[in-house]
Image (cartoon, grey):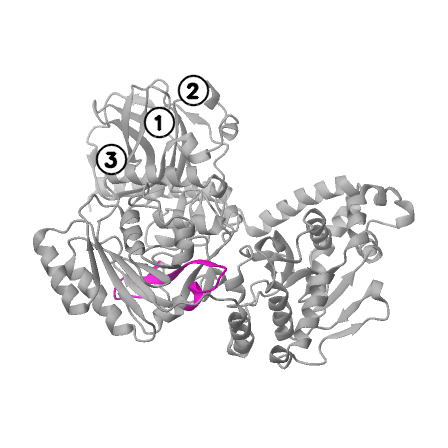
Amino acid sequence: MSVLSKVKQNIRNYLTTKYDAQYLQELESQFTSYDDWIWEQNNSKKETTEELILDLGKEEKEKQQKRSLATKLSYSQLSILKKEDFLKETVLEHGFGDMSEKENLLEKGTIINRLWEDRKIVILAEDANRITPDAVDKIVQVFCEHPEVEVLYTDEDELSHEETVRMNPWFKPDYSPDTLLSYFYFGSLVAMSQQAFESAIGNVFSKKEISKLLEQREISTDCKNKDNLKINHIQSRKNLYLLILEACSTLRREQVYHLKKVLYSSHSIIYWGFEKEYNEIREYYNNLREREEARGVSIIIPSKDNPFVLDRCLQSIIKWTLDFPYEIIVVDNGSNEENREKLEMMQKANGFTYLYEAMEFNFSKMCNIGAANAKYELLLFLNDDCEVRGSKWLSHMASLARVKTTGAVGAKLYYPESKRIQHCGIYNIHVGPVHKLQFKEDIRPYYDRRNLDVRNVLAVTAACLMARKSIFEKINGFDVNLQVAFNDVDFCYKLYEAGYNNVVDNTIHLWHHESLSRGSDESPVKLNRLMQEKKKLYQKHTKLWEEDPYYHPGFTTDILDTSYSFDYEYPHHMHLAVEHPTLLQALPKGTREDQCVAPMVEYAGDLQGWFLEDDLITKIEGIMQTKNAAYLQGNVVVLGSDNACFDKKLVLRHETSGDIYEISPEWFYRPDVFTNLQDQINVALSGFACLLNMEAMPIGRYEVGILVTDMISKQSLLRVTTRSVERCHNGKN
């Protein structure tokens, strides 16, 4: 190596070290641990509670904070608290001082007093000493504000062995009756009204079929003093499971409350109830559910010009479906003459119903046509690019669909010839409906067993979706205005809003050649159609915007991440400055388009499409001065290079004139990118988000692109995406 080459290499090494150090410093500044986050949450909320009850001194606050997690343990304790017990525990034990000196406490707590005069609450804990200091207060508040609530459960987390660091939160879904029949997801802290508790206890002991399942002598009651009933030592988890299933078996959705607060901390979170020793309990309460009769299933398959794909689907149904009566209805929206003849021959060979109607592709309309011609009480909508991969799949789904409280039933879907997950439920987050755990290998339990068991979800894909014909007709089937995308999500949202529980059965699976029948949605035209149909979806279901009862708000909702990532891991974007795009006279000399620049644009569009609420938009500095505003969010990685050494800009290229505008966004920590691209270098700070003021820009559509420049070699690379934003006459982008 020549002297000049050595000098250049030394300079590159020096600069690389410098930029890597700057990168690590910025990364550290953006990192937040769960322990920091939960203490911040608790401290801010604790101050609010203290303002309402009592102003503690600084010394007493510090004592209470230390005491909250250092208490020693005893096993499962259960008690019915009355007013005096509550005041004694919260006032004396938690350090509020002598009640005689705090007479104004009762006056300020009149709402609580009214509650305790009328109702009593049973609090069940795996270990009473692991309850956080504010747990009783929070639980009481719920029962006070929601008199309809009969059963309540909370979130929880873990403590390090030294009891100094909190970690691994268990954020649970809202009441999920099917999930509860799969395992005891209520966890370590549950509360019940005394009426619900006593009724459940009485029913359990009076029913011969389940009383024999009780582990006797582990529930004892002292009824001598009815005002202070004590229940000692529920050591058996079986008894607890029986008690809760019995109590919930007659309750409505709104009577079982999920308190989204971490009120219990243990050394180790344990999932239980799915093991074989609980089989009899689960089976009893599953069989107890009221079901509608069904003679068979009508399998409805929309298909056009795909005889080979369709035949593979049909043969897999015929091979694996031997335990439940069915018929097959193929709905064809206009195959060419050659393919139509092939389908007619297949019809004669396999005996299915063939409905041909030439029309523009409209998945919703095709499904509705099939349903109108179905003879059975259960409808199964199945993509022609699905393959059945095991027996009893249809009877499994039918058993769930027949339950009167059940809406749609979906199945786990794998990518072909693999255990790679394509679908195990659809969740509703800020960026829209997403398939969580998509692309993950189904070789272990993921967060909260979300890839296992029968679970309640807000929606399932119509690639394989079963529902009773009666409820299909009740909600008017699929919406024909959603021709291609989100029609299945809309269908499930309508069922949920009508009071039904949607279910995904993760105990069965099919293969799905995703969107093989109609291609992908990556072209600009298809992307625009996708965005328009998503907009229609949320115009119909405004109350479900950013809301999903089965997806905890502690998870991130702003990021298109298929894992269950926590919101505290991602910096918030609400404090972004408004960017004014700058016209570039020319791209840097030598700039070339290169596929090694890998952008993922998660959102590009108007503010209403992202923030929805106008009053929220007006809070963003600088937005009130213009209606021509847009929001961009996503991530970008330069593959095969040290990303710390690149200066990255967003660019907007006018589709007509070719003019390019440059934007310098803020770059954010993206743990999902870091996790998914561990073979790449320094990619954790790959997230971008920016608010754009497009007032000074010419009217028209702008393609979104990425311009990166190697700060050492000065080489610039460009990558233009299929996403775009628009500057319109009327101020709507």
The image quadrant where one finds the C terminus is top left
Question: In the rendered structure, which amino acid carries the disc numbered 1?
Answer: Asn
Between label 1 and label 2, give the one nearer the viewer: 1
Quick one: label 2 or label 3, which is nearer the N terminus?
Answer: 2
Question: In the rendered structure, which amino acid carries the disc numbered 3?
Answer: Leu
Residue designated by label 1: 733
Q: Is residue 592 left or right of residue 113?
A: left
Q: Secondary structure at mark 3?
A: strand
Residue designated by label 2: 626
Q: Residues within 10 Å of mark 3 (few under 14, many from 20)?
A: many
Task: Tell me where the magenta segment starts and ends, as one range.
Answer: 399-422
Question: In the rendered structure, which amino acid carries the disc numbered 2?
Answer: Thr
Quick one: label 1 or label 2, which is nearer the N terminus?
Answer: 2
- Labelled disc at residue 718: 3
Q: Nearer the viewer, residue 22 or 100?
A: 100
Residue 595 screen position, x and y as percent: 22, 43
Q: How many marks?
A: 3
Residue 11 screen position, x and y as percent: 31, 39
Q: Secondary structure at mark 2?
A: loop
Residue 374 screen position, x and y as percent: 30, 59
Q: Is residue 401 magenta?
A: yes
